[in-house]
Amino acid sequence: MKGYYDAVELYYAKGWTDGLPIVPPTEDRVAEFLEYADVEPDHVVGEIPERAVYVRAEKVAINAVMAGCLPHHMPVLISAIEAVCEPEFHVNFLASISSPWVLTILSGPIVKEMGFNCGLYLMGPGNRNNATVGRAVSLIFWNCFQAKPGGVMMGCLGHPCRYSFCVADNPDSVWGPLHVERGFPVDANCVTVFGGFIPRAQRLSGKTPEAVLNYLTEAISVDWFSRGAYVVIVPPYYSSIMHEAGWSRRKIEEHLIENCGASVAELKWRGTKWGRLRSVYVGNPIPADFGDQHRFVPLFKSSEYDDVAFAPGELQRKPEIIIVNGGAEAGQYVAHVTPYSQSTEPVTKEIRLRK
């Protein structure tokens, strides 16, 4: 056991861990992960060309072992790292002072087959698969992308989900699998990566889709007010209400896109939103003009106020709502994850499992 503890302390001393103990990545264990995924150690899984960073399969396996993963998690991690390295994800932007982080979402038969949690305590802790896969993604960022203090991370406050941020969509959802909405076959296994902030939960009320979504619309509208993709996590209690009334994921998305927004008066009062990152920005609440309380600024749809309500990068992003069906049967809560406001877009990849 002394060798084990010495290895753990070595990783602390070298700055190779996130502050939690690691599983020592022995050569045999790393080779087992590579063999399971049928990849060579020097296979390039992802790259960040502008920083000349290349993530090879061996590094993915090393960090997966360190995080406590099992060999069958390796294909999931390969697809996740491929996804965050896609140009539209803009992985470099996660070094922001506002401390966004990567949410990893699993969908497909793999959720049941590997035992990912899509129910009670969806966002953890308690499930090894969610916890270790999410942690492995973070450790790969830590050790391969230098996404850590002293590296490129510039977060003012940090992000508690930085340790692990992985959830699964319910494969038995009344709406069908999430990845079908994102253009993949129903029997596929997929991973979606999303750059965002801390999940925000709201206790809702109502027995109709419109009543329920009124609360959610308000919660999203009073948040960061950034145009782009949002993740909304809907538990079975509310997905059943929606489904029975004939509401699909797409109809919910359309409703939110149509109705989310704030008045000009509200955005001026916030100060940091009106003219943010533009020449008219003052950084303090701005007195409202007569009638501003009746002038509506859509969060997801273009309007005459775009140039002062949103930063330039936000206007280039595709507005969408990624609706994850998960959580406990009991409880009247829904959560949403606000996107990082500047550039990152969600990316979905199919997971190539061993035949």
Image (cartoon, grey):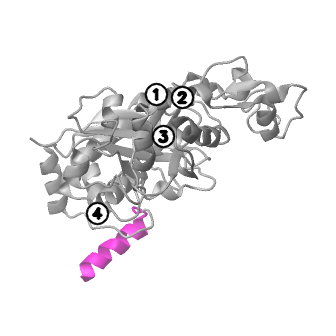
Helix, strand or loop at mark 4:
loop
Q: Which residue is mark 4?
A: 68
Q: CA distance from mark 2 to mark 3?
A: 15 Å
| Mark carried by residue 255 | 2
Between the residue at mark 1 and the residue at mark 3, the CA separation in whole angstroms equals 15 Å
Q: Earlier in the sequence, mark 1 or mark 3?
A: 3
- Left or right, 57 with respect to 266, comes to left
Judge the density around disc 2: few (<14), some (14-19), many (≥20) Cα neighbours within 10 Å. Answer: some
Residue 95 is situated, as x and y percent measured from the top left of the image, at 54, 45
Q: Give the mark, 2 or 3, whose residue is nearer the N terminus.
A: 3
Q: Is residue 117 magenta?
A: no
Residue at left 83%, top 35%? 282
> On residue 231, which mark appears?
3
Q: Which residues are magenta?
A: 1-17
Looking at the image, which is closer to me, 331 or 224? 331
CA–CA distance in space, label 4 to label 3? 27 Å
